[in-house]
Image: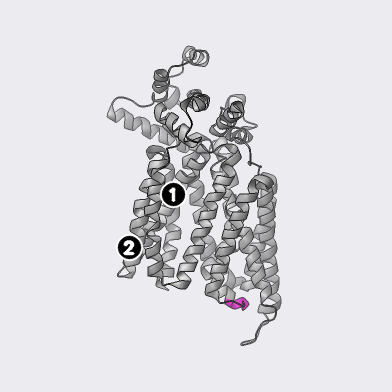
């Protein structure tokens, strides 16, 4: 019981890490930040494995929870920035596969061993993860934003298959131009902090018509950094405050209003709510398998569903998969509510239920559908936000995800007590039905589209100046790949 209580602390700590990750990932970079995060992961698992008392177990849970939240922004930003549009969906699906594999393995370890041994085995993962991340390059667009053009060129050569610099020259030049044009658009924004002393039409015209050497590009990219230490810190602080203001501007706010409600509908579809109490729920339904092994079955369904999603997302698309699986979750939850009303509610003490395989099959359907649709908002995080706010927006969205996760699990027992088991699943089924309607009208298809096309979708309807969008990373890769054929 103690590990379960301490484990719930990690859920409420995850949003704090997510909010911080959006700021830190822009400062440290995607790769460096992901490598550093393995240190608190390792420390947290070791503390959990060797905790001599309850207080130390809580400290370990807080550390692991905050670190989980910190991982969201760098992972999703990195995947979106290094992948071509034709493989981006599959790569983000791979992240979901390993996420579900982690759930399955932890459930399996918990069934075969005690919780200390499971934590000890988990402590080895950060070591291998740090070694793996050390072998991959930094995101090229982040390197360009810091004026490291040569490093960005090397990273592109590695990412495109260890090719020669000449093979990525066009893509590199377009990434540089994308970054410069983004800065020029920011200079045209009606913000005193950015326009004062910097708006120069002659300079802008010259930059549009005259090709730049590498030296000039570095100068333009790095012109926000002042030579004096105090001024540099002040400039970074102003820039970060401006990024926060960008969260409420349409190019970022519109995708936020898609992703955050998507997370809400995913976590209140039923499976997330019952996951900490799955043994109790399965016993109520009198499943033909024990509650402990039922969690393993649920985790296995999640793994199978994400593998299926990885293989079909390119063929079917994210929108049809999301709608079908949301409808499947609603159907499973409503049928479980009907079964609970008809069979469980009238049950007398000691009486055995009939057709106990029916709820098990419905739980498998719920786990299967939730395993697919639960990864969709994470996949959108790497696609729908503009580069300037991608890290911060991803952190805010992940924080919302973890808040909904905590609330859904925390309120299940209260909902069951107030409305009984059938009322709880009827509530979750209704939420999924509302989610289906929301996604039908709001969710766009992003599979196979460049980040430029996706960004344009969210800037449509703005004024002429603000609707002017620049070539984005996915669009650059897509055009360059077409030209090289």
Q: Which residues are magenta?
A: 283-289
Q: Identify the disc placed on residue 285.
A: none
Q: Residue 241, relative to residue 74: is it above or below?
A: above
* SS under mark 1: helix
**Visible residue check, residue 328:** yes
Residue 344 location (% of width, % of height): 66, 78
**Visible residue check, residue 434:** no
Asked whether 165 or 462 is in front, the reply is 165
Disc 2 and disc 1: Cα gap in Å? Answer: 20 Å
Residue at x 52% of width, y 74% of height: 292
Q: Residue 367, relative to residue 390: is it above or below?
A: below
Q: Residue 330, relative to residue 293: is it above or below?
A: above
Q: Residue furthest bottom?
A: 350
Q: Quadrant of residue 288?
A: bottom right
Residue at x 71% of width, y 77% of height: 342
Q: Which residue is mark 1?
A: 71
Lower sequence index among marks 2 and 1: 2
Q: Which residue is mark 2?
A: 47
Label 1 crowd bin: few (<14), some (14–19), many (20+), radius 10 Å: many
Residue 183 location (% of width, % of height): 47, 25
Residue 184 inside the magenta-drawn segment: no
Asked whether 92 or 227 is in front, the reply is 92
């Amino acid at each position: 019981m103690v590990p379960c209580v301490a484990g719930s602390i990690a859920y409420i700590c995850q949003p704090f890490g997510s909010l911080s990750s959006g700021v830190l990932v822009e400062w440290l970079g995607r790769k460096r930040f992901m490598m550093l995060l393995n240190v608190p992961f390792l420390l947290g698992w070791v503390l959990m494995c060797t905790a001599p008392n309850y207080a130390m177990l809580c400290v370990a849970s807080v550390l692991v929870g905050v670190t989980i939240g910190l991982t969201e922004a760098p992972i999703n930003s990195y995947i979106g920035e290094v992948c071509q549009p034709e493989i981006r969906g599959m790569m983000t699906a791979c992240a979901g596969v390993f996420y579900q594999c982690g759930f399955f393995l932890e459930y399996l370890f918990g069934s075969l061993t005690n919780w200390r041994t499971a934590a000890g085995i988990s402590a080895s993962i950060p070591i291998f993860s740090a070694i793996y991340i050390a072998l991959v390059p930094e995101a090229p667009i982040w390197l360009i934003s810091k004026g490291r053009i040569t490093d960005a060129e090397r990273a592109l050569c590695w990412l495109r298959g260890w090719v020669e610099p000449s093979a990525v020259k066009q893509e590199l030049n377009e990434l540089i131009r994308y970054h410069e044009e983004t800065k020029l658009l920011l200079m045209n924004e009606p913000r005193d902090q950015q326009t004062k002393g910097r708006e120069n039409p002659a300079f802008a015209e010259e930059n549009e018509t005259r090709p730049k050497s590498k030296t000039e590009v570095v100068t333009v990219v790095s012109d926000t950094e002042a030579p004096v230490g105090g001024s540099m810190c002040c400039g970074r602080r102003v820039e970060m405050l401006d990024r926060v203001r960008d969260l409420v501007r349409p190019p970022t706010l519109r995708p936020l209003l898609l992703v955050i409600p998507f997370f809400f509908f995913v976590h209140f579809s039923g499976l997330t709510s019952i996951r900490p109490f799955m043994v109790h729920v399965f016993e109520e339904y009198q499943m033909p398998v024990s509650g402990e092994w039922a969690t393993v079955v649920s985790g296995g369904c999640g793994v199978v569903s994400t593998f299926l999603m990885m293989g079909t997302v390119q063929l079917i698309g994210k929108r049809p998969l999301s709608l079908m699986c949301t409808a499947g979750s609603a159907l499973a939850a409503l049928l479980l509510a009907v079964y609970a009303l008809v069979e469980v509610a009238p049950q007398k003490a000691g009486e055995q239920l009939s057709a106990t395989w029916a709820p098990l099959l419905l739980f498998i359907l719920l786990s299967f559908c939730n395993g697919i649709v639960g990864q969709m908002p994470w996949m959108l995080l790497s696609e729908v936000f503009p580069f300037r706010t991608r890290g911060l927006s991803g952190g805010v969205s992940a924080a919302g995800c973890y808040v909904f996760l905590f609330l859904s699990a925390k309120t299940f027992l209260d909902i069951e007590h107030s409305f009984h088991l059938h009322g709880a699943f009827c509530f979750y089924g209704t939420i999924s039905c509302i989610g289906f309607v929301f996604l039908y009208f709001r969710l766009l298809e992003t599979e196979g589209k460049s980040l430029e096309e996706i960004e344009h979708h969210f800037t449509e309807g703005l004024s002429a100046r603000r609707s002017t969008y620049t070539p984005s990373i996915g669009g650059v890769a897509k055009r360059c790949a077409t030209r090289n054929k």
